[in-house]
Amino acid sequence: MLIRIENIADYVGREVTLQGWVYARTGKGKLHFVQLRDGTGTVQCVAFQKEAPEAVFETARQLTQESAVAVTGTVRADERAPGVPGGYEVGVADIQLLQAVEEYPITPKEHGVEFLLDRRHLWIRSSRQWAILRVRATIMRAIRAWLHENGFVEISTPIITPAAAEGTSTLFEIDYFGQRAFLAQTGQLYNEANIAAFGKVYCFGPTFRAEKSKTRRHLTEFWMVEPEIAHCDLSQLLEIEEQFVSHIVQTCLRERAAELALLQRDLSHLENIAPPFARITYDEAIERLQALQAQCDDPEQKALLEIEWGSDFGAPHETALTEMFTGPVFVTHYPAAVKAFYMTLVEDRPEVCYSADLLAPEGYGEIIGGSERIHEHATLLERIRAHDLPRENYGWYLDLRKYGSVPHSGFGLGVERTVAWICGIEHIRETSPYPRMLNRSTP
Ligand code: ATP
Ligand code: MG
């Protein structure tokens, strides 16, 4: 019977056929071990000279890495057997060689990351990359499931857009039949139109930002999910965010335990992720960081922690802040000057806005940016002018403030940063199937 490795536990004692690829082969003399992967998992297949027909044993002996095969044999439970799910092996009775591979370029030895990124189309087969991308797929499914369960409607927003939404410095410009257009940095402005039609909406898709500095956290193409809610203020928004993020984490713990184990993720940091998350204001964050900096003995660290009221946090600040808490932490009420033009200003203190970033623990940094949006026409127009944005591009967006405008809020969660956090991955490049960065747009 043809089965998938993920279901192997149901077939102990039975003869099965597995279609897959040779991940590794070891052994000598009378015994050969083939680690077979089929996309759903990895299992050890054992060819024993005494049991397998001579020709089959010879095929097993000659199998090379990444050769395509169909292996038939009997499933045995053996708790020492490696693999995912692990604990099972297949006693080989037959091997059909579908394609023999000569010299697969990625060998079990260590390769440099640029070498691997150049071969990303093959690298995704490696167990670690496979595990990360499986977790990513689960995160994307959990995102849609939670939003659906909670009454959000997915409304796609355009990728080709006429105007900047998140500041002009990271725009990718394209030639749209002789006119200037830009790849979307966010779908938010369209979400704000969509809430008046559907109440609670989200868009979910690729997002483009021409990030000109190299960091561990920035790609030039990444996926963002952006929920937007009518009749919602900042405190209601944060409650939505903490439930949403907790659901994503708990789904991964439940469904991707084997992958997280393969990644050697310390689950104790994830198991306790549940509402409510800690909340501090930007003012309080600055005070705490300045106090920490004042006490700091290491001159290098001291310089990194330097910060004045009004500046945005860098990675060292975010890391230091999250170390003061056990789980994720919301930082609210940022200075308006470091945030986008559409965020609502605090009435009696217009230098700060009703915004919140969510910082992931263990130094993974910001994973969500969100805010209340200005809903009065005159105020919005004034902010567009203050940011020197071309009013003519925002005609339709201003229009929304004329026809049934209500207080509303929304946020954007970056998929890759969420994957990096949940998987415990140092650099965001491994969380995207085909990462796009300052110096890389291939394969
Ligand atoms: P940062 O300050 O880290 O550049 P941002 O303030 O530009 O982030 P937002 O505009 O609030 O980020 O975007 C919402 C979310 O999208 C972020 O919290 C993050 O998860 C994700 N994100 C933003 N820029 C990138 C990027 N270049 N690569 C990957 N994810 C990103
Ligand atoms: Mg940014």
Image (tube, helix red, strand yellow):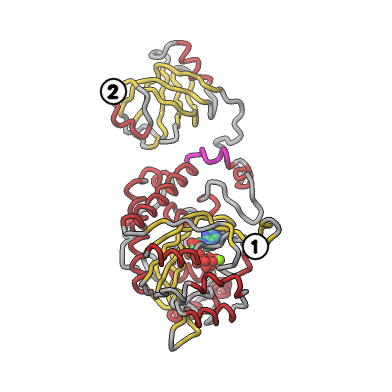
Count neighbours of disc 2 (C-alpha within 10 A) and say few if under 14, some if 14 to 19, many if 20 or more.
Answer: few
Q: Residue at x 64, y 49 (%)?
A: 441
**Residue 291 appearing in the image:** no
Coordinates of residue 50 in the picture (x, y in percent): 39, 13
Do callouts 2 and 1 mark residues in contact (Cβ within 8 Å)? no
Q: Which residue does the numbered mark 2 point to in the structure image?
A: 13
Mark closer to the observer (2, 1): 1
Quadrant of image for the C terminus: top right
Does residue 107 lie above or below 430 as drawn? above
Magenta region includes residue 139: no
* Secondary structure type for disc 2: loop
* The residue positioned farthest toward the top in the image shown: 54
Depth check: 35 or 50 in front?
35
Quarter of the image containing the N terminus?
Answer: top left
Which region is colored magenta? 121-127
Q: Position of residue 262 (x, y in %)?
A: 42, 43
Q: Residue 89: which quarter of the image?
A: top left
- Is 125 within the magenta? yes
In the picture, measured across the screen, residue 41 lies left or right of residue 395, that is: left
- Residue under label 1, please give it: 212
- The mark that comes first in sequence, 2 or 1, is 2
Q: Is residue 393 above or below residue 58?
A: below
Name the foreground residue: 181 vs 361: 181
Secondary structure type for disc 1: loop
Which quadrant contains ligand 2? bottom right
Q: Residues within 10 Å of mark 1 (few under 14, many from 20)?
A: some
Q: Residue furthest bottom?
A: 348
